[in-house]
Image (cartoon, rainbow, N blue to C red):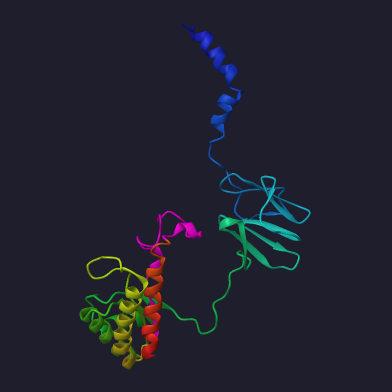
Amino acid sequence: MLKRRQFLTGLAALAGSPLLGAVSAHAAVTASADATAIPGASSITDSLGSIWTVSNGVIFRNGQTVGNTYNVSLLLWYGGKVWHSGTGGQFYVLTGNDTWVQCNDPRVAIPGAVGSFYGMNGHFDYAYTPAQIISMLKALGCTTYRVGCTDDPRQLNAVAALAQAFENAGMTLFVLVNVGLSDSSGNLYPNEDVAYSTARAASQTIASTLSPFGVTMYECGNELTRQNATVMNFTYAGTKVTDFNNTNWPIMRGVMRGLIDGVKTVQ
């Protein structure tokens, strides 16, 4: 049996060995400060601990090139993402699969376009009357109100009452056609054709009911790409084909196509 002194001596000898060194490799990563840039810094450390550098206008991550880059004049760590621009001034941001996508300088706020609106989101089953809702929205300076419904008469009649009141008040109702990927029993539509025809009929009914009251804008479906039937795991970012359930994807496509076509048959 080892004596205490022998054990401590052996432990001290191991401290610098790969055995214990491997433990330190899993220590918390300290990323570079937000807005760290090259030039300015010699390297950038991202949230995964990867080291980014620039050499002869080319970007390297841990000594390996990342995508196709050249004439890079700025490498930037900002908002948890890696950005770069070239001598021409165009910015790019790194997305999934190590792809650089054109974008604007993330450090520069882009002013809203002339004619921007300020809106609020609501629901068809609020206890307030249409007049009360309009009064509250006007007090907040809102000009647009988003509200969803299906072709169920209870929902659609409530939204129709809102639409009539909004038209009289000179305000805009932005209607979400809230049709999903399942039938009333919660069963996924069996195929794309059934999904299309069901969604088309529903949106046609909604648009036919609301168009007389000046409704011209519709949102066709609510986050259909983030449903149990369409994603493999809700923790995935949704930046890769494999993040989605490609078996059910045609059903979602049928619903989207049906919703759009149904509205267009009316307006």
Q: Is residue 243 magenta?
A: yes
Left or right for 182, reference 45: left
Position of 42 relative to 203 (above/below): above
Q: In terms of depth relative to the viewer, which is nearer, 179 or 122?
A: 179
Residue drawn at point x = 27 percent, y = 86 percent = 160
Q: Is residue 116 left or right of residue 16?
A: left
Question: In the image, 95: left or right of 122?
Answer: right
Residue 227: quadrant of the picture = bottom left
Using the rendered image of the protein, determine whether residue 168 is visible from the camera's viewpoint.
no
Q: How many marks?
A: 0
Is the residue 164 above or below the residue 75 in the image?
Answer: below
Dominant SS of magenta comes to loop
Magenta includes 116?
no
Residue 48 position within the rendered picture, expressed as x and y whole percent measured from the top left: 56, 46
Of residues 241 and 221, the one drawn nearer to the viewer in this rendering:
241
Magenta part of the chain:
217-245
State the residue at coordinates (74%, 68%).
88
Is residue 98 visible in the rendered image? The answer is yes
Residue 149 screen position, x and y as percent: 29, 77
Residue at coordinates 61% horizontally, 23% vertically from top-left? 17
Please identify the quarter of the rendering in which residue 136 is found: bottom left
Q: Quadrant of the C terminus?
A: bottom left
